[in-house]
Image (cartoon, rainbow, N blue to C red):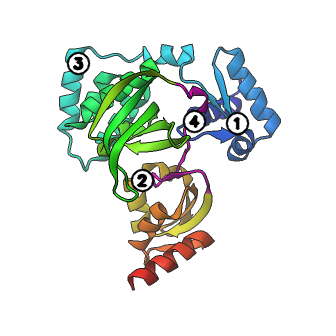
Amino acid sequence: MDQPKLERLLRLMKLLTANTTYSIDQLAERLDMSRRTVYRYIDTFREAGFVIKKTGDCIRLDKESPHFRDITQLVHFTEEEAVILKSAIENIDDTNLLKQNLKRKLYSVYDSKTLADTVVRGKNAPNIRTLIEAIEQHRQAILHGYQSAHGAKVRDRRVEPFAFTTNYVQVWCYDPGDGVCKLFKTSRIASVTLAEEEWQYAAEHREGFIDAFRMHGERRFRVQLQLGMLAYNLLCEEYPLAERDLAALGDGRWLLDTEVAGMAGVGRFVVGLLDDIRIVDAPELKTHLTQYLQKFA
């Protein structure tokens, strides 16, 4: 196989296993290839033994595929090694990007309760372990005392957990009461109880779109921003995923061309750096900032 084709296959694999799901048209646009080529590459994965999952118009590689299990076996820690590793990682200063990068890389190849203890600290660790059990056993769970960001309500939520975001910060769950998939912040959960009931809505489990500013939603808005040196450095430090959508313009300037789920995340970033960011193309963001600044003027 020639190197360009191999690179395209690997890029497609990355998109098909990301937290965000994509349709064939979106994959073709992002990879700059035809729909026919995308389908042909997906057939290549299927013939190689990978499990392909399709939900509506979106398609992805199932991480339960045997090949992913084989890959995870390449990295294994004994309990003693995990304790040493946890101590070593936590001794790194929290402001050091190496610490988060190391956790992120470990999470990508070694997903277990031991790693959860390494990544998650304090009272939240038992909740993560219970959620992992719910996912592994395909059972419902009860999130006790969940603090909603909307209306500051605190109540119990019966859900079907099925996936975590990076470093267990949030968990994707299907909410039978509302009939939709939602993201729940693990730090807002008082405690978690494993329910007796098994998943009843597995066909509805789908990870939604999360933008570089860690906001999620069903809609997507394109945002183009020109950044100065300060804004560029802060963006890369605070929101590492945005780096994939950056292009150097020269003279200490960069172009951020990305999609966002809403204006709240990117808006907060821009407001703090108004003198170092120029909006190139983002009408919804301009409207959002105008209303925001008028509100606090």
Q: Earlier in the sequence, mark 1 or mark 4?
A: 1
Counting from the top left corner in percent of width and height, residue 79 is at 23, 16
Residue 277 in view in this figure? yes
Counting from the top left corner in percent of width and height, residue 164 is at 43, 35
Marks 2/4 in contact by CB < 8 Å: the verdict is no
Query: Which region of the structure is painted magenta?
Result: 200-220
Q: Amino acid at mark 2?
A: Tyr
**Distance from the alpha carbon under mark 1 to that under mark 4:** 10 Å
Q: Amino acid at mark 4?
A: Arg
Q: From this viewpoint, which residue is outermost toward the right? A: 36
Residue 118 in view in this figure? no
Q: Residues within 10 Å of mark 4 (few under 14, many from 20)?
A: many
Image quarter for residue 273? Answer: bottom left
* Local SS, label 2: loop
Marks 1/4 in contact by CB < 8 Å: the verdict is yes
Viewer-side label of 2, 1 = 1
From the image, tell me which residue sits under label 1. Answer: 56
**Distance from the alpha carbon under mark 2 to that under mark 1:** 30 Å
Q: Amino acid at mark 1?
A: Gly
From the image, tell me which residue sits under label 4. Answer: 206
Marks 3/4 in contact by CB < 8 Å: the verdict is no
Would residue 51 be found to the left or right of residue 232 on screen?
Answer: right
**Distance from the alpha carbon under mark 2 to that under mark 4:** 24 Å
Counting from the top left corner in percent of width and height, residue 178 is at 52, 43
Q: Amino acid at mark 3?
A: Glu
Counting from the top left corner in percent of width and height, residue 144 is at 31, 38
Q: Residues within 10 Å of mark 3 (few under 14, many from 20)?
A: few
From the image, tell me which residue sits under label 3. Answer: 81
Identify the residue at horizontal 56%, vertical 53% (top origin).
245
Q: Earlier in the sequence, mark 1 or mark 3?
A: 1
As drawn, the label of residue 239 is: 2
